[in-house]
Amino acid sequence: MISYLEHLKRVNNHADTKWVAKYDKKGLLNEIKQIYKPFEYYAMNKHKGENARPLHNKNAIIKIMELDKLKRNEQK
């Protein structure tokens, strides 16, 4: 079975596709949401200002997931 991290590394996504990362209280990755239309996300969340979750491109979300995997392995 392929993990989502491996899937992201293999699949070619549209350049406009972005991801939002959500974290739990321990600072570990809790959820990743794919945003297909970032301009709509910005329009719906601009009232949050600096508190809005940042959008990440494919390379950034892969790096975030790899760092989270290392953190989880260190905690074991």
Image (tube, grey):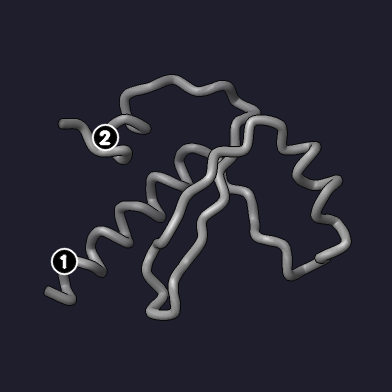
Q: Name which residue type carries label 2.
A: Glu
**Precedes in sequence: disc 2 or disc 1:** 2
- Residue 10 point in image, percent of width and height: 31, 24
Determine which quarter of the picture holds residue 1.
Answer: top left
Q: Secondary structure at mark 1?
A: helix
Compared with 28, 12 (above or below) is above
Q: Secondary structure at mark 2?
A: helix
Q: Is residue 43 left or right of residue 59?
A: right
Q: How dense is the environment of label 2, judged by Cα within 10 Å: few (below 14), some, or many (20 and up)? A: few
- Residue 49 point in image, percent of width and height: 83, 65
Determine which quarter of the picture holds residue 39.
Answer: top right
- Residue 59 point in image, percent of width and height: 45, 40
Distance of label 2 from label 1 (alpha carbons): 17 Å
Determine which quarter of the picture holds residue 45.
Answer: bottom right
Q: Name which residue type carries label 1.
A: Asn
Q: Quadrant of the C terminus?
A: bottom left
Going 64% across and 56% down the picture, which residue do you hit? 54
| Total numbered badges shown on the rendered structure | 2
Q: Is residue 32 left or right of residue 20?
A: left
Going 22% across and 67% down the picture, which residue do you hit? 72
Q: Is residue 50 left or right of residue 22?
A: right
> Which residue ends up furthest to the left in the rendered image?
76
- Residue 16 point in image, percent of width and height: 65, 28
**Residue at which label 1 appears:** 73
- The residue lying toward the viewer, choosing from 71 and 33, is 33
Going 48% across and 37% down the picture, which residue do you hit? 58
Q: How dense is the environment of label 1, judged by Cα within 10 Å: few (below 14), some, or many (20 and up)? A: few
Q: Is residue 15 left or right of residue 73?
A: right
Compared with 42, 36 (above or below) is above
Going 47% across and 67% down the picture, which residue do you hit? 23
**Residue at which label 2 appears:** 6
